[in-house]
Amino acid sequence: MERSIIEVENLTKVFGAVVAVDNVTFSIDKKEFLILLGPSGCGKTTILRMIAGLEIPTEGEIRLNGRIIFSSKKGIFVPARERDVGLVFQSYALWPHMTVFQNIAFGLKVKREAAPEIEKKVMDIISYMQLEGLKDRYPQEMSGGQQQRVALARMLVSRPDILLMDEPLSNLDAKLRLDMRAEIKIIHAQTGATTVYVTHDQVEAQTMASNIAVINRGIIEQIAPPKTIYNRPANLFVADFIGSPSINLIEGKTESGEVDGRMSVRNEWFSLKTACREIPAGRSVVAAIRPENISIVPSEGLNTLPGEVLTILPSGPETVLRVRYETYVFSLLLMQQVTLSPGQKVHLYLPPENILVFDKETENLLPLD
Amino acid sequence: MPKPAVSMEKRGTTIRFSRVKNYVRQPHIVISLILLVILLIIVILPFAKMIEDSFVWQFADTRLSRNAEPGGLTLFHWKRVFASALTQNILFRPLMNSVSTSLSVSLLAMFIGSFLALLVSRTDLPFKKIIATMAVLPYVIPSYIHALAWLNLFKNSRIGGAAGVFQYLTGITPPDWLSYGYFPIVVTLSIHYFPFTFLLVSAALTSIDSRLEESGEILGATRFHILRRITFPLVLPALLSSFILTFSRVLGTFGTPYFLGTPVRYYTLATQIYSNIINRIPSVGYILAFVLIIISSAVIYINQRMIGKSKSFVTIAGKGFRVTETPLGKLSYPLLCLIILLFIASVILPLVLLVWQTLTLYPNDYSIKHLTLLFWIGEANTVFAEGEAGILLNPAIIRAAWNSIKLALVASVIAGFLGIFVGYAVVKGRNTKLAYAVEQMSFLPYLVPGIAFGALYLALFSHRIGPLPALYGTFALVALVCIAKNLPFTGRAGITSMLQIGSELEEASETLGARWITRFRKIILPLSIQGAISGFILVFITVMRELSLIILLVTPETRTLTTMTFRYQEQGYTQFSSAISVLIIIIVVFGELISRRFGKKNGI
């Protein structure tokens, strides 16, 4: 296997009394598309800026292609301009006093490439990014989407091995964002550049990433492919943060005495059979089930709960339901249009194989089998 | 979730060293450190030196005391100012005069300025736009020029020399209280400073959504009631600010109280500082300057505190709200006449008086048949003015004009660039102690009244310090003091424009491989220069009309137009002083018009 291209070890950044990034370790393989995902203020942008060299870490080590570019122990700090990474800012950071051509050519001029060479490279990237006819415009004379393309072009023209993007799509409207997602994916596939991408948008993360690192309060909660993050969240934070509507959480204690060796979770109202391996009874746990995994069934049976429909939120092909049972309100995501009405009594079915169980104390996922 | 604590211990000195090295390698840190050294020399050091000098016997002190041993330590000067038979004359009376003139001027200027602001921004007064533009002019004209105009009008023969126009026309000798002292000082300075209140209060009024007032109206309140209960509390912060800032500016004003007060021995702290230093008792002057700085700082500190507190309830809710105009009805034209009168008194009349004065052959003969252009374009002639040529042909004046322009150019360009660097260092280093130190130190000169700042520089640079030669008598010293004094303005402007630019534009170029020099040249400078240009012009105008700050520091070699005016006036050549004043007015008004071209004015 090829060596990891970005290696981050025990990275810590302290601003005054605030620990923004706390002892973070991860590595990114060649051609990988890693997304740093987390709520605002979780430290994801700080991690990106430390890789770019715009922020000096308090502690730790960063290597690019095996070369140490920062090490607190060895006293190494390679400034941003010597790291050869491309960075796209959330604000695009296009220079308002330069035309599109000048913006894109800047990096090449700084590297003192020959004028004809620069001209050719810039024109190539302009046509690649479909910016023809805009080369003499100033940034403020263009739409948000066009500015975004210029920012990408400016980064790509120097052909960096590593692309860093800090919420590049968050200033675009919803439709344009969809287009640009696809475009960035294509760029990634064509250039094969290792990419680190910061976002707080979980849909963006799931559609684009080869790996997602979920970050919370300066630490990495889980780093895994999108499907794993969604289906097997490592802990309650990840489970709760990923998915919309949010995952349904049910507190209870483990029950034993079943013959098949599978755990049940019981609280004061009901008991749920799960697919988890049995553990000693009486432990406090949290069971969780995604809204789309709960279904409405005609009659009672295993893992069914009677409930009363509270609200119905139809949106095109899908419908979000809120159903109350005693003190619990379950969210359901049904891939259909429904003819229910508020107040109606329904039976909910929670399939055992879709129920995740987390230890209440450590908040970590309990093994499924 | 259990979080591993950051281990802040267990690291050797090598790591600490490398951390320091990495820290220092950041360009904004380097710039901050350089700025810190510059600021120490041009701001902190003069202050320290001034305090030191006040405790040391000066050479000239041998005239005052037999015990004086030049160079030795003494409390003599402090005792002389604070606890001696002279205290009454040296400190108390000038202090009282300073405070009473400052208070009166602030009140009067606040009243005129806010009344005018209310009329212009809240009523249907005719010609509002023109009035708003004109209202700033008295402030553009240097304040002591109003004093000169006053003298041209009301001078009596008390101090010898020629009487003014009033006496010439009416044959009545104006009483002393009208010619000199408290009354004319208050009137001329109020005329000069009311635009300041006008600007601040207008800005406050236009930022108040008049829907706030309308909602009062809907609830059945009368116009007066709304003014008192809604509008007034909302502009109160601006009113207080203008009052306090006018107060501290008048406190430090030198020219006007010198021209109008000194002839009748009406001293203020500012003129007392000057005469002590001129009479070679500099240490006493330094102590008085110190007193002035303390009062001025206290006043500005109070203002900052109040602004900080009241900001929270200023109701600026976006732009584009409507302003309803109160109809003035029958009052409309009487009020307009009043405003025209004010304008005549504050701008036209002084100008006419000055120009008229320049055209008189003999200082006290204002008759038409004796008008002459001699003082403008006359050849040198031993019959007049000790053989000085008219100002447009006079080499000394042309040199002074050149000095003025050179000084204003050098000071505005250097102060402007320093301001950009201050902005860069402060914004890049946000929330660090170093950036905070740079910001605070660059603001310090604002607290020091002009005449006292000149005194500080006199104390420091009259002899050599370490590797620095004695700068007294050089152009460099005059330029340095102007740069330092204007740094608070250019620094503020720099910080504002850096905040607007944001750090990402520079970082983007950094990730593309640009060195700091390239980043500064290609990104930061082009982006901040636009904002800086109006700052440049502002400083240019300020230096062009500067008197208080440089009067203690200029020598015949480094004379400027303003100090030439001062000398001529002192020697009784009122035609020359008036002519140069007219020249200065032309230059500053022209500069003001150019700066308007460049759009928004930042601060005054």
Image (cartoon, coloured by chain):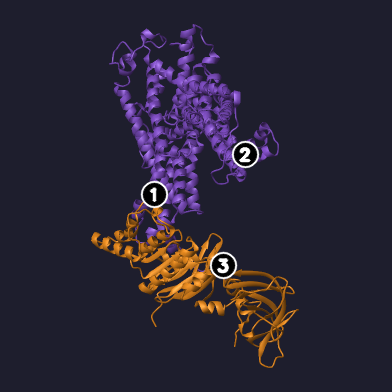
Chain colours: A orange, B purple
Circle 1 sits in a helix, a strand or a loop, which is it?
Answer: helix
Residue highlighted by disc 1: B527
- Can residue B15 be seen here? The reply is no
Image quarter of the N terminus of chain A: bottom left
Which of discs 3 and 1 lies nearer the camera? The answer is 1
Residue visible at 31% across and 17% down in the picture: B388
* Labels 2 and 1: the sequence-earlier one: 2
Residue B486: mark: none
Residue B234: mark: 2
Residue visible at 46% across and 19% down in the picture: B349
Label 3 crowding class (10 Å Cα cut-off): few <14, some 14-19, many 20+?
Answer: some
Subunit under mark 1: B
Quadrant of res B125:
top right
Circle 3 sits in a helix, a strand or a loop, which is it?
Answer: loop
Determine the CA span between mark 2 and mark 3: 42 Å
Say if B424 sits above or below A322 in the image.
above
